[in-house]
Amino acid sequence: MTRRSGAVRIFLYNWPVYSFTWTLALATVALSRFVPAFAAWPIAIGACVALAWSFASLLVSFYVYDASALVSGSWVAKLIETSMPWATIHAGLDAEVELDAVMRGQCVARLDIFDPQIMTSPSITRARSVTPQAHEALRCSPRALALGDETCSAIVVAFTAHEIRDQRAREAFFCELHRALRPGGKALIVEHLRDFANFVSFGPGYLHFVSRSEWLRLAAHANFAIASETRVTPWVMALTLERRP
């Protein structure tokens, strides 16, 4: 299946925000002529910053999802064992990497954990409506994964866990990952972070992401050890968690 450009997808998922930002910025610049000069400059600068953030987010999205190392998936094998039974978990959008091309072991499950009660961002609902799934997936709750105890050696969760907006639900999800993994098995969490690089690129939109400290807290809560932590790009973290006995 041919995947749309990352910038196009991000725009489609968030088009009301982009449309509002562009309309407000242009209207603000047009109306600035009717305010005193000392106020006009700050207004114009604010409008330019808003426009710059919106276009920067699309450019960064194109790079991350279309032109960066993320796309090839060559980095996955360096972080988790790819020849063992594995599962992938998403919220209806599959992974940005075609995992079947890089994972040599058997895929034992593809789970769609979308739950409108705890995934409340309008963007994820729009994303599901405009993006066909590359593979059929089994719907289940992030609080109760449709996986048996200790059935997987690897679980990949890419750009999905942050959509679980409720903290307790995230904690339950990480405990479920621990339950489904074999001792020594690994969960690969791939996410943007609520950090400076994403703030510069996405502006206030970076608040949609989760901080590094929160991911580490969740790992500790679920009794995971940190096997590795790396940046696939300056904007994307790949956190490998190893299941303790």
Image: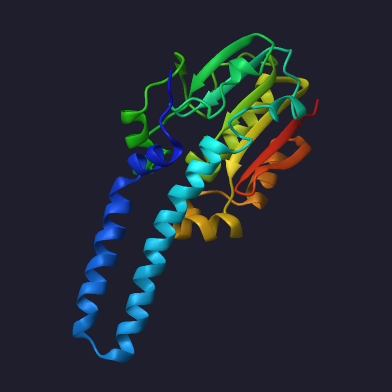
Q: Is residue 119 above or below residue 207?
A: above
**Residue 119 location, x and y as percent?**
42, 38
Between 87 and 66, the one nearer to me in the picture: 66
Residue 188 image-quadrant placement? top right
Q: How many marks?
A: 0
Quarter the C terminus occupies: top right
Q: Is residue 36 above or below residue 30?
A: below
Q: Residue at x 55, y 54 (%)?
A: 198
Residue 148 image-quadrant placement? top right
Q: Residue at x 46, y 55 (%)?
A: 56
Identify the residue at the far front of this view: 67
Q: In the image, 138: left or right of 151?
A: left
Q: In the image, 160: left or right of 103?
A: left
**Residue 113 location, x and y as percent?**
47, 26
Q: Residue at x 64, y 23 (%)?
A: 155
**Residue 25 location, x and y as percent?**
29, 66
Between 122 and 1, the one nearer to me in the picture: 1
